Image: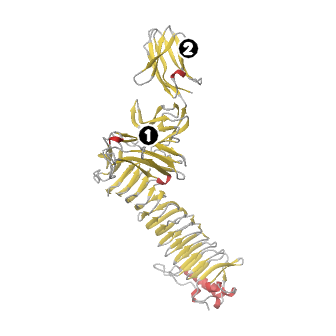
Amino acid sequence: MVNPALLPEKRNIGKGINMKKFLSMLLSVALIAVSIPVAAYAADSDGIVDKHGAKTYLGPSSAWGAEWNEASFREVTNKKVSFTGNLTIKAGDIKDVEVMGSGSKLTVSGGTMGKIDCDGTAEIKGGTMSGVNASNGLTLTSGTIKGDVETGQKVTVNGKITIYGSVTAQDIEVTSSSGAYISGALKAGNSVSLNNQNAKIKEIDGQNMAELNLKSYKGSLPTISNMLTINVDGSSAVTASGKIKAGKLVIAQKGEFTTNYPLEIDTLTGPGTLSYTAGKLTIHNAITDKPLFSFINPVRSGITAFKADRGVLTGDEPMIYDYELEKKASGDYEDFVLTSTLKEGVTLSNSSLYLEKGKSATIQTTIKPAFSEFADGTKLVWELHGDTSAFTISPNNEKRSCTVTASGNGTGKATLVAYLVDSRGTRLADYKSDYCILTTGSASQSFGGSLSLDTSAVTVGKGNVYYVLAMTDSTSAPSAMSYNSEIAVVGKPSAYNKDGKKGWLYPVTGVSKGQVTIDIGGQKMIVTVAAGCIVVDTSFYTMGPGGKYYIGVKFYGLDRKGLNVHSANSCTTVNYAGKDQKGTDLYLVEAGAEGTGYVIFETSSGQSVQTQVVVASGVVPHGVSGRMVAIT
């Protein structure tokens, strides 16, 4: 006769009995009855699977604590294990595991097994298995699961477990101590809670029912899909890793949500900060509790900040510094366009800055009117938005500057904002703020549209400014950055629409000798900065005998006395003629007899450029402008 505690019990599984499992249980009973003595188990004892010698055995916990008696155990090496009640698996090699009884508990601390199916709760603290299904909840701490994890209740992930599959549950919590790796998705019917960013998770799927709760979470999020609500608490600063469409986004005071991707929300609730790319936000129902909008791309008056379903918003709902919103109809939507008349306030020395890990750079400010004209107690405030874990900032109040250090690992992108406050800390809304886009690692992101640069490589001198045109139909300026701001910096763009070309014009300024990549919307230009150079404004000119023409030359890091200027033949002469009103040095070319001549500009290093001059009778004077560069 077999002890009832060892026999599989019938299970109520909804509307009826699963006949396949019922027959399997009867077969298990028959096998046990044939092979296991009556005295094998105590009726009140939990089961343990462990190794003895080189074999794996199942036996009661009381038997494992006594002198070895093989009659008290069943060998289960490479066999399926079925058990009613509480079961602990410590070691060994077995196949599938079935634990029956709604009040049962399975604990796995080691061993290798197939799929686990438990009617009660399960705790995985070690071992390797092909999958886990526990009806009443799961705790995952350590070990390796090669497939999916499922439960009808809650899953708690609180350790460095590896899961090569998805996790499906009503509620899923990833605790602050978790360093788990989950290659599939977290699929929840009610809620997902993430308490830190240490866990590596591919995707979170709310199945259009669940809410995502972010608590003390700093850094990049997994891919998020089908989420009903996203809650960001006041100690979180999170960055989206892809397009998000959700029912509701709630950002608590001091919390921050950053995205460079399209964001489509039914209802947005503050009062925390939403940092995003202007034009990529869509609201369908409402904006409540005054969220602060911060832009992570260059903006100006006329840029669309966001769009909303027609008639649902007035434009007063969000908080936007420096700008007001003008509403314009656009089909079934309304565009909310930025407008501003502010001229005075803060201007930063950099609009963008790229830093390698561990490197630092200092950003200077210009304040108008002079800072001394402001009331006593006025202060300059620096704030960092976006991936704040990637950078540290050190303001210098005396110099009104800020040193930025790339302190984080991998890719990071943030926005540094500077603004003025009064003695009580209230922002001076009548004076503009300014911002600098910070990038480290390989965080350059491609522009979401057609884009090309009119220049692939250019040489400039120290202090020389070159304007590169980013050709695009977009009304939003692509993000731009220099990979080394100690060599060259890229400034704020201005809209351009001339001669059939449309886009954004970016000033690039040489800082020190070297070579650097400038990235504009994912398109790259190589900039070589010379210790010194000249830029000659004319490549070709035609005029009649006795004619005169002025060639303009700009000097960068090079003294004019070090430049050798001469004519290559007798049909022209050239002499220095002083400066024009803009400070450009002028060289007067006079035509003599008919012929073709060349005016040569040669630097001390031997590099030279030349302007071709054709002298011919009866011609209308004309020429071709150029940007000819000779370096030292």
Q: Would you place residue 117 above or below residue 8 in this image?
A: above
The spot of residue 191 in percent (x, y) is: 43, 67
Q: Nearer the viewer, residue 202 or 238?
A: 238
Q: Nearer the viewer, residue 517 or 488?
A: 488
Q: Nearer the viewer, residue 384 or 139?
A: 384
Q: How many marks?
A: 2
Q: Is residue 271 left or right of residue 193?
A: left
Q: Amino acid at mark 2?
A: Ala
Q: Would you place residue 513 above or below residue 334 in this image?
A: above
Q: Amino acid at mark 1?
A: Ser
Q: Which residue is mark 1?
A: 349
- The residue located at (43%, 24%) in the rendering is 583
Q: Secondary structure at mark 1?
A: loop
Q: Which residue is mark 2?
A: 568
The spot of residue 524 in percent (x, y) is: 52, 39
> Crowdedness of circle 1 by 10 Å Cα count: few (<14), some, many (20+)?
some
- The residue located at (72%, 78%) in the rendering is 53
Q: Is residue 607 visible?
A: yes
